[in-house]
Amino acid sequence: MIRSQGRWTDAGTIVEFCRYARAQGLSSGVQETLAALEAIAALGPNNSDGLKFGLRSTLCSSKDDWDLFDDCFQTFWGGASTLPRRTGNAPKELAPRAKGRNSSSLMASGSGDDVSSEQGGSQAIAGASSHDRLTKADFSTLPQNDMAALEQISLRLFKQMSRRLARRRRIGTVRGQIDLRRTIRRSIPRGGEPINLRYRERKPRPHRLVTLLDISGSMSSYSLFLVKFLYALQKHFRHVDTFLFSTGLTEITNLFRTQRLQDALKALSQKPAGWSGGTSIGGSLREFNQLHRRKLRSSDTLFVVLSDGWDTGDPGVLAAELAVVKRRVRRLIWLTPLLGLKDYQPITSGITAALPYLDVFAPAHNLESLLALEKHL
Amino acid sequence: MVEATNMGIVQDLPSGPDQGVDAIVTGFERLGYVTDRSLATAVYLVTKLGKPILVEGHAGLGKTEVAKVLASFLNTRLIRLQCYEGLDLSSAVYEWNYQKQLLAIKIEEGSDSTVEEKERHIFSREFLLERPLLQSIQVEDASPVLLIDEIDRADEAFEAFLLELLSDYQITIPEMGTVQAKHVPYVVLTSNRSRELGDALKRRCLYQWIDYPSLEKEMKIVRTRLPDIEEKLARQVVGYVQAVRGLNLSKPPGVAETLDCAEALVALGKLQLDEEAIEQTLGCISKSVDDNAKIRSAGLDKTLGRSMEEAL
């Protein structure tokens, strides 16, 4: 299809570029390569702008790709794009860069498919048993090198869980609207008399979810996973409001709604909202009640606090504020990583003050415990 | 008829690709849409390869406008589907006109046609309400432009259906049979990235990211859209909005806001942007109380001073 008029637009070079771009982390496959060839053929040779823009619009499929593309293009064609710098084995030379993109800090990397494939060898052999071990491991005691693997598993399981929740149907006690379309279809054999009515049922409307996540120092080894857990849950609920608290309250609803997980995590790590500071649960709840109480609807709101209950404030305040919340929600859930400890007794002043108001008090220290929450949602 | 309209398109787009892209840049500009070669190349490929294009970018940067301008550029029909949460096939593809069907059944009660005939009658085209997607593949004379706006708001089930439509350009209506596209529409999808789209859909599309324009480009846009505005005022407004974008607002102003603000200033008879003018037009730029506060506390004098310098 490509006539080799200019040396640098012959099909071979384009294919080579596609391979190179893929090695750099662009998410394009064979289909995109074919589309790219078609595009370049349509745009004609000796069209340097066309080469760049044509390839960019065919090979990219997201903002991430878009950002990565210019670099790839620049390196491959050396900027001038009139003559190729013959690349030879350039893809191999540059391969480490692609890996570097993913092995940055946990916070920045979030998930990366490459992480798992890099570790592919050992992972595959370890198989089910390592999967088992990791889902039961406490987040805080997990060795660093297991983090990436656990992240992979957790993202997958969180996704599965939220999909499962979305599929679930409740048995309807109230019939929905009449489905005229099917009613009429059924009525034809009876001369058009709609005798058997057909109904259309509304998809069950998921609860609204309001979460307060403790990001104080004592929770730091858990916070990151819990954030990801919350992010995955978003899909299931019609409406999610998410807040972080330590000494004060920060709303991150919008961040969660509009950003992809990686971007959201990146943005969070830059927020000065006192990651790993002290805790004032009561104070934060009071702030919540003052500013956001109207977000609670007793008919369908699920209110989740993720905290270990180490409160430096007055437990009386905590109890009073929780009482306010309790009146306005359908269910009040408190998750704590500490329940994972063998001999833990809920006797800290914060927890004892809160306990009377809770509908569910459950552990959240490892993947298994988080997934077990499904039944409460 | 069909050929005549197609001829028109061919005449609009010169055969050479370079000229083709240039023709799109100038043609779009003539229609009041300032574009660059990157977007124009993508649009050119849409017309040549027949692939859909997915346009992403922040709000107010003219994503939807791309489709509208493309339609008037090609002198063809624009069919628009606005997506929203809960959008279902009966409002996107087709629906039967039930009331009319019921009436028809009543009317035919006395006739001696068989049940099969009656059925065929009430499920004929006469009773079909065509929604945008079905319309788009039924256009008789030329390929229309199909705009699927804010696809990220529709749910995944709908996305899957769309995938099917975009690969075969045919829709099956159980009661009637399969409708095949007479002319494959030019499809423009827009997304605000409120959720990640499925890979399969993304792969099927060309991709275009629209970023905030540079100072020069935004000036050109303001001049094109508001030819009457004073050069000095335009420069101040653009400089001011560009500075506001740097403030990390919850809803940074797009080009649409720049134009609103400039238009408002012209309507207010302002000749230059001063503190009072900024206060009066704050509602054009910022859409929340928090953002208002941020802009005010950012120091108007400072932003103003900067845009003044740029104006000189």
Image (spheres, coloured by chain):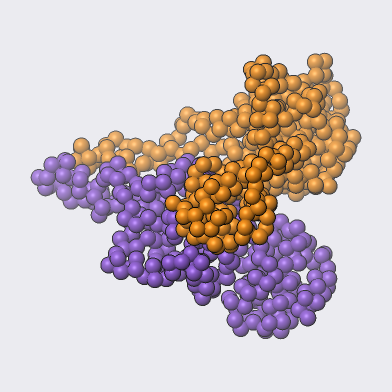
Chain colours: A orange, B purple
Q: Who's the residue at 60% across and 33% down the image?
A: A159
Kindly tell me whether residue B84 is visible in this rendering: no
The quadrant holding residue B289 is bottom right
Q: Position of residue A220 (x, y in %)?
A: 82, 33
Picture quadrant where residue A273 is located: top right
Residue at (18, 51) in percent of width and height = B107
Find residue B108 and report its horizontal and vertical position in percent: 16, 49
Nearer to us in this view, B120 or A210:
B120
Picture coordinates of residue A125 (x, y %)? Answer: 65, 18
Q: Is residue A189 left or right of residue A9?
A: left
Residue lying furthest left in this view? B112
Which one is nearer the viewer's eye here, B119 or A120? A120
B105 versus B76 height, above or below:
above
Q: Is residue A359 left or right of residue B156?
A: right
- Number of numbered discs on residues: 0
What residue appears at the point 64 percent right and 44 percent down from the top-left corner? A88
